[in-house]
Amino acid sequence: MRESGRAQASGWPGVGGQLAGRLAKLDIYRQEDLLLHLPLRYEDETRLTPIVDARHGFPAQVEGDVVSCEVTLRPRRQLVARVRDGSGTLVARWLNFYPSQQKQLAVGRRVRLFGEVRGGFFGDEMVHPRVRPIEAGEALPEALTPVYPTTAGIGQATLRKLIDVALRTVALDDPIPPDVCARLGLPGFAAALNALHHPAPDADPSALESRDHPAWRRIKFEELLVQQLSLRRAYNARRALGAPALPVRDRLTAALIAQLPFSLTRAQQRASAEIAADLAAAHPMQRLLQGDVGSGKTIVAALAMLQAAENGWQAALMAPTEILAEQHFRKLHGWLTPLGIDVAWISGGRKKREREAELERLHNGELLLAVGTHALIEDPVAMPKLALAVVDEQHRFGVRQRLALREKGRAGQRPHMLMMSATPIPRTLAMTHYADLDVSVLDELPPGRTPIRTRLVSDARRDEVVGRVRDACLEGRQAYWVCPLIEESEALQLQTAVDTFQMLCADLPELKIGLIHGRLKADEKAATMAAFAAAELQVLVATTVIEVGVDVPNASLMVIEHAERFGLAQLHQLRGRVGRGTAESVCILLFAQPLSDTARARLKVIYEQTDGFVIASADLHIRGPGEFVGARQSGVPLLRFANLEADDDLIGPARALAEHMLAHEPGLAERLLTRWVGGREGLLRA
């Protein structure tokens, strides 16, 4: 990731401003960056194929004399040439061409063509082959030809020339100790680069293209190492900053635990102790609290916020949706009001007078705790004694939003940060993309949670599902019916929440049915949710606004419409809205045919698994790390070369070597960071 100002590249010797600007689009700003601009694939130009032996559908290189070349106008304007060797004749055609190409193909010239052979009306042909005029007897290349990622205005020949110059002129020093390379079976840096930019004719092309070749593994190990160095250095730098020390007082926190109608699980006790120890330190906590749906993260956050309040400091909890934020507020209000602690509720949907009164009390320090949506980070909200910022479902907020909450604190004092996620993070992601965080895991559910049975049902059996909802509700249970869209989409042809609500009202006249979606006003949403929680409504038709934070123990049945359109994490989150009481709970996944391979894989996982960590690992495999962590909006660096699944064995050694380098050989660490990011800490997360 580069700083935006770097895009105004001025070039270096041999590279002018115009070319430098084009190279910047490829993230190439220095000659050193060319070294790590690695091939996408390779073409074998080390051998010639007689025209008669060229196989249809496969790339081949042929050499022969041009026997004719003309521009034809039918069926469209195109350049057509015929090339003959001793075995036969091949037609080459270009639908888009330049006059210079026509000159290259003058009759009598000897040329080499590289392209895919196919059958044509006038015999075998190549369409848009690469052409190169040669002299008779000219030697063939001795290495596979690399094909690089490129952009408009930069040809492969230009890139190859620039990279070859860089390989000759840039010092290819190797900061990684030889014993580490030997233990992992990795070549040196210079050897790896040469093997990738100029592979030998006998190199295994499949290993090169699948990136299993030892040279690729060396580059991937170094990339993982640089990521670890960058993130761990950020972690160390953060610990050098000042934050309010919040020692454990144990008066209010002990009182809260004593009055709870449930006992904390061992995992909750462990996570609370880890957070309490972090808060007592004079450097900012940066901790991720992750746990499966229903594992009890809110009470852990409440204990942390109470620790701040006991020390006379403020704490804020920010959630991505109004429903989730209000759910947190109601829980905290119910737990803390008996202890004499008021909690502010900051929401864009509140009446202006009420909101301004809360803001004034926060500003003068009368209120110590606040819960809200992104309204918390708007300018009028001032919390001068903010010591702890809690962000729930942190991956839904961008870097700027998380920073804005942190900046609410006093100048010169950075608040502690506790981020929560109900999407469990696979071990490989925790070790790489989250390497600058401490992680607490809630790996057990509170006792009494009812197992949820999952059923896959084709939408052709919709009437049976409606009957199942009727029977459950007449027996005194409640049900959710979840739809993916509010309005009809012609492109997706999805049933909408509004249409489903009307359909269920017609089919189930004996039941009371409610509708909730993101476009309702806040007070309408709150009234509908309150009615459902009070069992005044038996069925709640909803969009994914109920994905997190909704807790109605009597709701034991959920129907998810067009389940094939949802992601795994969403399906798991939605399913977690039932199974919160004592009744047997069922989640019915309605799907439409035909299913794509990806949709089939997702539904198979959610049907077979209830463990959030297993589901998260499968999600990582299906979607990839960039989508999984929301990297494009979160600031998390995407890996260019390493694959977190295929290269899992390299992550641990990279992490260990990064720790060693930062502690004992910071100069080597700096050289590696300079090689990969040019001294710019672009890999650091906020």
Image (tube, helix red, strand yellow):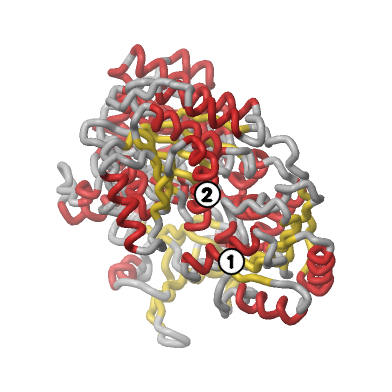
Counting residues from the start of the chain, the first of labels 2 and 1 encountered is 2
Specify few, some or many for label 1: CA neighbours under 10 Å numbering under 14, 14-19, or 20 or more: some
In the image, residue 120 sits, relative to residue 666, either above or below, namely below
Task: Label 1, secondary structure: give it.
Answer: helix
Please name whichever residue, 148 or 479, is drawn nearer the observer in this view of the structure.
Answer: 479
Please name whichever residue, 261 or 677, is drawn nearer the observer in this view of the structure.
Answer: 261
Task: Label 2, secondary structure: give it.
Answer: helix
Expressed as whole percent of the image width and height from the top left, the position of residue 494 reads 63, 74
Q: Is residue 324 left or right of residue 21?
A: right
Please name whichever residue, 682 or 400, is drawn nearer the observer in this view of the structure.
Answer: 400
Provide the residue designation for mark 2. Answer: 330
Q: Tell me, yes or no, if residue 403 can be seen here.
A: yes
| Quadrant in which the C terminus is drawn | top left
In the image, residue 433 sits, relative to residue 461, either above or below, namely above
Q: Tell me the amino acid under the disc marked 2.
A: Arg
Residue 528 got which mark? 1
